């Protein structure tokens, strides 16, 4: 979680307004900055392209793969890394499986939402 914008905003707000409400307002503006709400559409588009490329990489596919290839790769990877497969394993193994399956699910969802 990014907090630099929140901290900077809160400190700057406190200094400018000399009141706690200034810190709150600055913190909210910093949160908007950290969350990317203040980015232009062109900046969001550039990051979106990187997210799609990363999603292909997570699924082990080349950019531009067909929907059938994406579905096949997703089903194969999720069957390998599903947390239920390692239910009896050590907690570290479970955590890795959960993290990996979460990344696979996010990549698949991102590719389903991509413009075609």
Image (cartoon, rainbow, N blue to C red):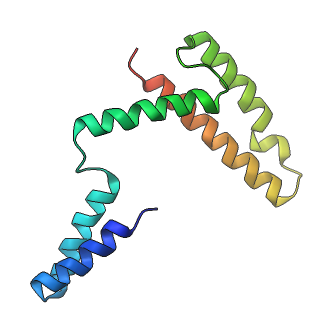
Lateral position of residue 46 relative to residue 73, left or right: left
> In this rendering, is residue 33 above or below 49?
below
Outermost left residue: 17
Residue appearing at x 31%, y 70% in the figure: 6
Residue appearing at x 47%, y 35% in the figure: 51
Lateral position of residue 94 relative to residue 115, left or right: right
Q: Where the C terminus falls, by quadrant? A: top left
Residue appearing at x 42%, y 63% in the figure: 2
Quarter of image, res 106: top right
Residue appearing at x 39%, y 68% in the figure: 3
Quarter of image, res 4: bottom left
Quarter of image, res 49: top left
* Residue 23 percent coordinates (x, y): 22, 80
> In this rendering, is residue 79 above or below 66?
below
Pick the residue in front: 82 or 77. Answer: 77
* Residue 39 percent coordinates (x, y): 25, 46
């Amino acid at each position: 979680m990014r907090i630099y914008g929140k901290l900077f905003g809160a400190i700057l707000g406190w200094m400018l307004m000399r009141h706690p409400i200034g810190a709150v307002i600055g913190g909210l503006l910093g949160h908007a900055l950290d969350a990317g709400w203040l980015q232009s559409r062109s900046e969001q588009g550039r990051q979106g392209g990187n997210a799609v490329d990363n999603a292909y990489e997570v699924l082990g596919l080349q950019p531009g793969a067909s929907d059938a290839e994406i579905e096949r790769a997703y089903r194969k990877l999720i069957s390998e890394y599903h947390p239920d497969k390692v239910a009896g394993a050590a907690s570290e193994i479970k955590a890795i499986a959960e993290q990996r399956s979460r990344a696979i699910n996010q990549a698949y969802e991102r590719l389903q939402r991509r413009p075609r």
